[in-house]
Image: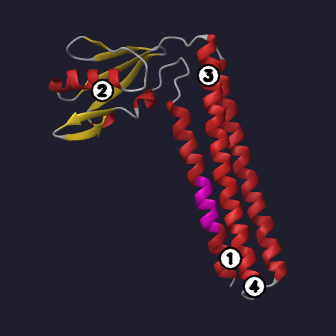
Amino acid sequence: MAADINQIIKNAEDKMSSAIGYLDDELARLRAGKANPRILDGVRVPYYGEMTQLTNVASINTPDAKTLLVTPWDRKLIKDIEKAILNSDVGITPENNGEVIRLGIPPPTEERRRALAKQAKQEAESAKVSIRNARRDVIEALKKSVKEGVAEDVEKDAEEKVQKIHDRYIKRIDELFAAKEKEIMTV
């Protein structure tokens, strides 16, 4: 039975870890005024009949803090890449010189920074909900295991362990959000 409880706790921790990973990805895509290649993660380009991630058909560099440079591995793709960036939700107009695509990252306005901070907070809250749901599921499974013969003190110890894991992940979310909010609000 103890092995079952440890497995239940491990599964919950895996779910919580996934929520942190997802939050980290979502926050990385928020454009905070400085060049970050990950803002192009969602851009897909038609390549041999398949929609392919931009990073699979081009290299993305940051020559300076305000510029992204997209260099396609196949020059024939440059128009498709430019079109994909224009049609994406990145919100930056690409400059195409025939060999590379340059994206100038404009500093966001005060209003835009506040909207980005609000969006980051929503992403953080969503991740917290996922973590709380994972904790709730574990506690329900533990209560069910008591009915199946697990000692109550074992169940209570497991609940405390899950609560500590939960608290650690919630703290990590708060740290990620605070760092992103600082990055967004810094002019």
The kind of residue on which mark 2 rests is: Ala
What's the magenta region?
10-17
Q: In the image, which is nearer the foreground, mark 1 or mark 2?
A: 2
* Residue under label 2: 84
Q: Amino acid at mark 4?
A: Lys
- Residue 165: horizontal and vertical position, in percent? 72, 58
Look at mark 3 in the image and give the residue it sits on.
115
C-alpha separation, residue under disc 1 versus residue under disc 2 = 48 Å
Q: Which residue is mark 4?
A: 147
| Residue at x-position 42% and y-position 26% | 89
Image quadrant in which you'd find residue 118: top right
Q: Amino acid at mark 3?
A: Ala
Q: Secondary structure at mark 4?
A: helix
- Counting from the top left corner in percent of width and height, residue 85 is at 34, 23
Q: Quadrant of residue 12?
A: bottom right
Q: CA distance from mark 4 to mark 2?
A: 56 Å
What residue type is disc 1 on? Ile
Left/right placement of residue 92 relative to residue 71 reads right
Total marks drawn? 4
With 105 as the anchor, is 11 left or right in this view? Answer: right
Local crowd at mark 4 within 10 Å, few (<14), some, or many (≥20)? Answer: few
